[in-house]
Amino acid sequence: MDAGTQLGLDALDPDFVPRPLVRVTPARLGTWADCPRRYRLTYLDRPPPTRAGARAASTLGAVVHLALRALYALPALERTPAAGAAFVDRYWSNEGFRDAAQAAAYRLRATDWVADYAAGSGAGATPLAVERWVTVATPRIVVEGRVDRIDRRPGRDSRDELVIVDYKTGREPTSADARRSSALALYALAARHTVRLPCSRVELHHLPTGEVVAADHDDESLRHHLARAEDAAEEAAAAAESLKSGDDPDVLFPARPAPRCGACDVRRHCPEGRAAVPESQPWSSLVA
């Protein structure tokens, strides 16, 4: 018996063309889950619609992430609080803040956050990778994404294990947030595949408080997150195909009005979102 017969390929229609796998990122899946209308406006419409300007909370988060990426690119002995604070100054931007005074106040906060983190919960970290792209393919989809940090730590059976680390600068997260996060679960699966080491622990590191919250997945919980991701990815892909065929975009990609509509960067193109929630100020989402 040849290999083709063994695999059942002899029974295939000679004109059969396998459907390409759907490529997704956790961010893209999150947008689809939150609001299909925003998904279409963000990822499908061409030319892309105009977007709102920068928001202060996004600027703050981006600066902190850049500073930490640079900090953990240094040799371990050079990852000092002063080095972390200096990186915040290097990457700082005033975009989205109310005025120069507010920007200056949050710049000081951010330097303190990163310096305290370097001396506290971030000290002694064992990063295997920083801002690393990881990917994993299933029979239905290809998931890929960039992880803030992947640590390599001793496991319980003397074999090294991977830990997914995600930085947060907004509200303080909980362990339930870590467990419910499909993005973190998908990163864990992709890291397993990419690095070829066990990975079940995911952590949220909250820079304003220095707190770390974690969740430990098992195979069942990871399968649950993966199955949800596969279903969502195929739903989004099917809607995109129907859109190409000329079907009604508002039916395929309905708006889901929610409080987040006030800060949506494509709200000017969404009557339902504008009607549901007043537009928020660019600095309104900052941690008090």
Image: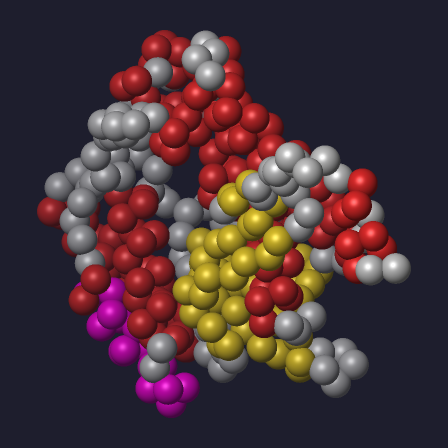
Instruction: Write down the quadrant of residue 88 in the picture.
Output: bottom left
Q: Residue at x 37, y 45 (%)?
A: 287
Please say whether residue 218 is one of the residues in the magenta stretch: no
**Left or right: 179, with 247 as reference point:** right
* Residue at image point 34% right, 52% down: 61
Q: Position of residue 14 (x, y in %)?
A: 68, 38
Query: Going by the image, does 150 lie left or right of 56?
Result: right
- Image side of residue 89 versus residue 232, left or right: left
Q: Position of residue 283 (x, y in %)?
A: 26, 37
Q: Quadrant of the C terminus?
A: top left
Residue, x 22% and y 72% (percent of image)? 86
The image position of residue 155, as x and y in percent, is 71, 78
Start and end of the magenta stretch? 75-89
Q: Residue furthest bottom?
A: 77
Indicate whether residue 83 is drawn in magenta: yes
Q: Please indicate whether residue 54 sits to the left or right of residue 32 in the image.
A: left
Q: Is residue 75 above or below residue 10?
A: below
Question: Does the image show residue 208?
Answer: yes
| Residue 112 in sight | no
Looking at the picture, how far across and down is residue 44, in whole percent?
Answer: 38, 29
Residue 22 sits in which quadrant? Answer: top right
